[in-house]
Image: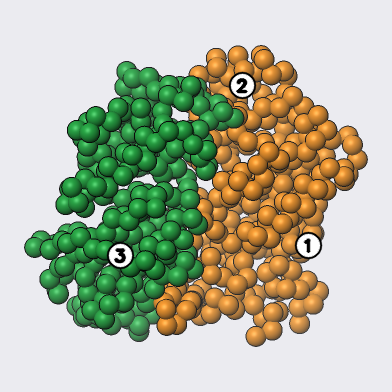
Chain colours: A green, B orange
Amino acid sequence: MILLAGLTRDRTLMHTAAIAQQTRVSFQFLDLAAFCESGEWEWDFDSGTGVIMAGGSVFDFRNDAFSGVYARLVDVSSTQILDRRIWSSRTRVLQEMLQSARCRVVNRPQADLTNSAKLYQLFLLAQCGFDVPESMLSNDARWVRQLAQPGRTIYKGASSQCTIAAMLHEEDLEGLDRLVASPVLFQEFLAGRDLRLHMVEDAPFAELIEKRPDQVDYRFSSGCRFEPFDPPAYLVKQCRSYMALSGLSFVGFDFIVRNSGEIVVLEANPMPGYDGYDRRANHAISHALLACLSAPAFSCIR
Amino acid sequence: MPASRRTIVILGPREDAVLEHFHRYCSAHSLACHRVSDPRDMPFILTFGRQRGVGARLAMNGEEYLLADVALFIRGMGHMMHSTLDNPFSQGEYFSALWALASQAPHIINRPGRWAWESRIAQERYFGEASLLPRSTSHSTSYFSQRLATLGPGYHQADVSNVTEHKTFSFNRAEEQAFHQSGHVLSGRFTGQPRYLIELFSGACAKVVLDETGLGFPVPSYLDLRERILAFASDHSLQHFAVVTLFVDGHPRLAKLDIEPPPRWYEEYGTDLFQGMVQVLLGHTESEVP
């Protein structure tokens, strides 16, 4: 039996649930919203087990009932009007419990927070041997105007909050005065194809994405072409190096494959929205993930 | 640039008493310093890439500095975001940006790491059995009452929630009532003998804030743990922190390594501790300032 934990409105988690159902992998679903609203729990951190109740279901971790947990615990407390503090606290409690759970957890909720600070994460990725893009992070229009090159610089959010990467144009320079309200991450525009590489433990699943030359963020672009990709061994080795550093066992790495062939890393997602890539890969990522979660008990790394 | 020419930047919420006292201390000793309580008042740029490596500049009150020419003292970063910025998006972006910036500062108290300014997970991994790990959590106060009945009279408590952790943490013997008042999110860390030793470190300066052990300071077994704590702090670039140790049947267990000690812990030794911080930040004592 495996446990899927997260929100019912998380399309990636619902995709995992659908594939588990199709492939007859036995699972329970722990609804984070139900837990925040009316969950009950008794948890012993020493043994990494306990009982959680939410939405009318009982999740009993005692006696090694679960071989693995797929945890996608997104803190959505800021969207709550009345119970913001309770949602935030309860999300944290559930994260703490799954962080300590004796069974395998993909990924342990507090294993790696560095995706919340994209430039900080780039420092770590560079340490693991990845090639990184020229980047600058600022809240000051004057300095950015000096260094940014309209038409050759893109911009995006500095944290893990969802933003759309876009090209900086000449006409955007005036609006840079608004940077004081919120810093922005600027990076050199790298012409080439996007590469998404999912690692499920040791196994790589890679896909090349070709977008139109004028497009920056393929996730929000139409007409992209996707094709499977066999990643070079050195790149997989660098990914493994980052996974060892971060303690993550399921990561979605984003790269640009430059026209010259060099591969430059953009970021490493500890909670990858992998469902689209998975559909095109005939569910190979889900199969690997479910196999990992269903594997017999092992001595886990907390 | 000589070390003594560095400018101290004190960054954190306006209402933080420790930051305010340190600012007054610096001003009284004619140390160049800026107090920043709103991140929008500190323009900065941080660059990084395969060709140029890391570079950073910041400005305060119209003066520009290289990151290498300032010494940062940061406290209460999350709280500062909430108290100055209305928009949750801006709070997240500023927190992330300052995390990245501070991680590259050559002179800083304290440097953020892989968990930003939260080092509890790293601590628990590092200290293992020598750490007083959280033992249980429940929504149910009766669950705790039952556990307390089986565990005896004394216990240590800490809050699991990041929202209230610093508000409810207490080095005094915790009362059962605290669980009931705080409701859903407490994690008990139980022990049969709540005897605390609290030591505050500030660079080379160390002061015992509380000693309930009755064993005389320093106990040899504490010195072993203390050595490990200092090695951990050095590995994680922590120069200013409090170590809360609980003696369980005479054996020291780390209850908390707190990088933002409460103001009351500074009351007796504030000047010595601030001197230690100046040494860390500027590389000298204030008596050596030209």
Whether residue A81 appears in this view of the structure is: no
For label 1, the crowd category at 10 Å Cα-Cα, with few meaning under 14, some 14 to 19 and many 20 or more, is few
Are there few (<14), some (14-19), or many (20+) residues within 10 Å of tag 3?
some
What quarter of the picture does the N terminus of chain A occupy?
A: top left
Measured as percent of width and height from the top left, residue B218 is found at 87, 46
**CA separation in Å, label 1 and label 2:** 39 Å
- Distance from the alpha carbon under mark 3 to that under mark 2: 58 Å
Q: Is residue B275 above or below residue A75?
A: below
- Label 1 resides on the chain identified as B
Q: Which residue is mark 3?
A: A231
* Pointer 1 or 2: first along the chain: 2
What subunit carries mark 3?
A
Q: Position of residue B137 (x, y in %)?
A: 53, 27
Which residue is at 55% across, 21% downward? B180
- The amino acid at mark 2 is Gln
- Can you name the residue that lies furthest to the right here? B216
Identity of the residue drawn at 45% across and 82% down: B52
Q: Residues within 10 Å of mark 2 (few under 14, many from 20)?
A: few
State the SS at label 2. helix
Question: What residue sits 70% from the left and 49% below the top?
Answer: B242
User: Mark 3 touching mark 1, by CB under 8 A?
Assistant: no
Q: Secondary structure at mark 1?
A: loop
Tag 3–tag 2 contact (CB < 8 Å)? no
Q: Is residue B31 visible?
A: yes
**Residue matched to label 2:** B177
Amino acid type shown at disc 3: Pro
Q: Residue at x 55, y 59 (%)?
A: B112
Which residue does the numbered mark 1 point to in the structure image?
B204
- Left or right, B66 with respect to A268, comes to right
Q: Nearer the viewer, residue A66 or B285?
A: A66
What is the distance, in whole Å, between disc 3 and disc 1 at their CAs?
50 Å
